[in-house]
Image: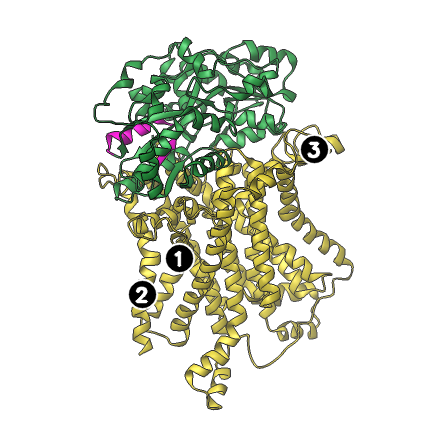
Chain colours: A green, B yellow
Amino acid sequence: MTTLLGAITRRRIMETSLGLAIAGTARAQTSIGITPELVAAAKREGTISYYHNSDIETTGKWTEVFSKRFGIEMRNMRLPSYPLFDRWLNESRVGRHLADLVQITDPTLLSYANRLGFVAEYVPEGGAAIPADLQERGIWYGLFSDPMGIAYNAKNVTPEEEQLLQTGGWDVLGDPRWKGRCGTATPASGGSSYAFCYMFLVTLRDRYGPDFFRKFAANKPDIYASKAPLFERLAAGEYALMDQGSTGTVSVLYQNGAPLRWVFPEPTPISMTSQVICKHAPHPNAARLFQEWCTTAEGQAEWLQYNTASATRPDVPDPRKARRADWYAEPWFKEPKTLYTSYLKDESFADPKKPVITEWNEIFGYQSGRRG
Amino acid sequence: MGRFLLPLLLGPALIVLILVPVGFMFLGAFMSGALVDPEARLTLDNVAAVYTTLPYLHTLASTLVVSLLVAALATLAGVALAWLTSRTDLPARAMMEIGIIAPLFLSPFVGAIAWLVLGSPRAGMLNVIAAEWFGATGPVINVATPAGIVLIMALYYVPYAYLTVSSALRNMDPALEEASYLNGSGVLATAVRVTLPVVRPSLISAFFFVFVLAAGTFAIPAALDRISQLRFLAVDVFQASATYPIDYGTSAAIGTLLFWISVLGVAAYRFASRAARRFVTVTARGYRIRLVRLRGWAAPSVALVVLYVLLSIVLPYLALLYSAFARPGGSIFSPVLTAANATAVASSREVAGAMRNTLEVGLITPTLCVALGLIVAYAVRRVRVRGAGALDYITMFSIAVPGIVFGSGVFWTYVITPIYGTVWVLVLAFIASYLPFAYRISDTALLQIDRSLEEASALCGAGHARTLTRVTLMLVKPALLSAWIMVFIFAVREISAAVLLTSSDNVVLSVLSYNYLDYGDVPKAAVVGLLQTLLLIAGVLAGRFVFRVKLSRQV
């Protein structure tokens, strides 16, 4: 079975910075996998403090499996990516080392934290199975990816409009027929929104650029400070469509019965759930064991039991696809072909000033309550 | 000796609890980055930009206008409802009263989400019903507009105005109204020329109290605002500190601006409430209130109360129940019900932990907060310690600091201490935030007790300690229990500071519902919101039946 990311590795077009992936690994502590010694040392530590930004339920169930398997208690703390990252940074700066591992959806920030000396270098055995462009070897590892397309409410679009969405590419967002019928979220709301806007305004500026967003802005989308309530309102029928439609969220609403469908125009941006071990982790062996488990086929397959994002290991198939269940059985569903991942290694993406936000705000006439 | 020792003990404790976090906020406003960022330097840029440039001044103006409107509307409704329940023979008054203060049990954050489900222009349940039943062609209500935001905020602040004014109305000596009636004045003339002037200080204090609370609110405008139609300082504070690029300096600078607005509001509130509390009302002399007979006005009056209860409680809870138990995307007229969300929440380890933490915080915070509030009030009012004025000011200080601003100051205060990351950091933050309420209620209770009662005890031979425990404490006990319940409600609902101070060991229900919403899981957020309400109701019922406390009688 071909996984989504298996498809990427074969068809990747946007891998502009693959060469960067192997850099800086000389000092990384290489693992020999989940050894009895590591498990015993981890058990002696007994606990893991896990800072994450994923769904609470999914993470709770997933980490419980790990807990039962190895007898280590998981203490999870969830916050949105950016506040979570900043919290960890500030704690590290004053020497309050509470977190063992940090998981967020903007891996460039994890690279930045590594440059500040807050990341423990460690190469898990399973890391070799994760594509090189979805990791910074020894530093962060992409665990799950979530493609973003155009999500629409099937009850609010005509068959002709649905046909247009299926074939019209990203430019369809600028079609005046969506005026007053669409919503979007500011790129300041999180790593996935920023990556989405970054693709159009930076990486593919020549093809799309500000004009692309100007046309979309002319449709007067309602602008949400966070994507979450926008998904909910789309499902409720408030809008016909939204951009930044993350598969992980729309598919859960679909499973719950919402009349949502989604298309993946090319190239399709992904958000990448990535994870590091903290340099001063209070439970270093337990943290290494968890990083090992997360990068194994077993750990990633376990995640897919509870969540619809894709595993980064090509050898971990989506069980729904194998069964041709859920949206895989729908005639309107087509998998993304070309994934946009190059931003994961793009130095300017990591610019903490995030200049794309200012440009986007100007285009959409959005004031976010900050200078610049 | 107590006159010197008490301030020595209380002063430093209050300074650490309240002034140090606020000090960190002001320091942060003059930094170019986070306080501990080695690249951060001292700068005037943030403050200069926030205090002198148009976008912020525009936001300041809009915050002032919205807060004044909310205060005016909430006070108007609060006064009308308070008069109806305290001075008239309104049918089923006890039940009506519970309905009026019931919005206190709903976190404004969850309430705002409920109203988005109810009143968004196209898919809002009320608009769908209007189109289906009455053939409406466009939205009949749109909460995502400035007017919608003002109205929703006003709805949630009515109980605060109500509690302040109804207390004054109940404590008012009825002889004044009796005299008016004896002189031939009618109900309306008596209400306008006698009742209103007597409760005017309470009314003004209610107005400024709601103004301060409204100015510091971020949950409602943040959830309902679209396309920056309405700029609000508290939302800007949040956005600058929670979305990228995170800009602590600007966030803190906007926080200081918000602080000054609140200081002005609190000054006006204190001035008015001082006038309102000047009168001794708990005396050895009994009286009976003469109730105005509503006669033909009874039905419209009941309709007014029912309308308020419908808008502030019934509809939002219906929306929450719908979100929690109906499958999304179905028709609201024939929903397909599911218990999946409730089951998932009930079996979640995270929810069990959050419930435990919420209970801990909910029990410890009000107990310590009321004890501290009473000690300060006793020191200031009865012992008249040296520096009483300063103690009074510091204690009331945090009312001017919105939770969203205070939380980051608390973070910097405690981050290097062992209590950071535990439930105790939440307890300390909440005690500091809600101390003004506990203090004010204790102070008012002490002030209203006629000294002759304590003097009588002394004359009968009781010592100072015996008089304190057998007379004074007994008399203020109902007020203290009311304060306990009020702080309990605030502590269980609080979200702004809780999010900023959350850790893997102290997640509370409000943070959990915030996280569910942040991930787009409205149904589970609704279930947690309902769970939070059940906890609040259990606490208040315990107070009502076990301790025989009536919240509305003592505030």
Distance between the alpha carbons at the discs numbered 3 and 1: 46 Å
What is the spatial separation of the Cα atoms under label 3 and label 2, in whole angstroms? 59 Å
Q: Earlier in the sequence, mark 1 or mark 2?
A: 2
Instruction: Report the side of A216 relative to B324 (left or right).
Output: left
Residue B413: give x, y in percent of width and height: 31, 51
From the image, tell me which residue sits under label 3.
Answer: B336
Q: Amino acid at mark 2?
A: Gly
The residue lying toward the viewer, choosing from A100 and B183, is: A100
Residue that label 2 marks: B11
Residue A328 figure quarter: top right
Vertical position of residue A339 compared to residue B22: above or below: above
Mark 3 or mark 1, which has the lower sequence index?
Answer: 3
Is residue B73 in sight in this rendering? no
Seen in the picture, residue B245 relative to B78 is either above or below; the reply is: above
In the image, which disc is placed on residue B432? 1
The residue carrying pointer 2 sits among few (fewer than 14), some (14 to 19) or many (20 or more) residues within 10 Å by Cα, namely: some
- Chain identifier of the residue bearing label 2 in the image: B
What residue do we see at 24% from left, 29% from top?
A: A115
Q: Position of residue B542 (x, y in %)?
A: 59, 62
Tell me which amino acid carries mark 3: Val
Foreground disc of the pair 3, 2: 3
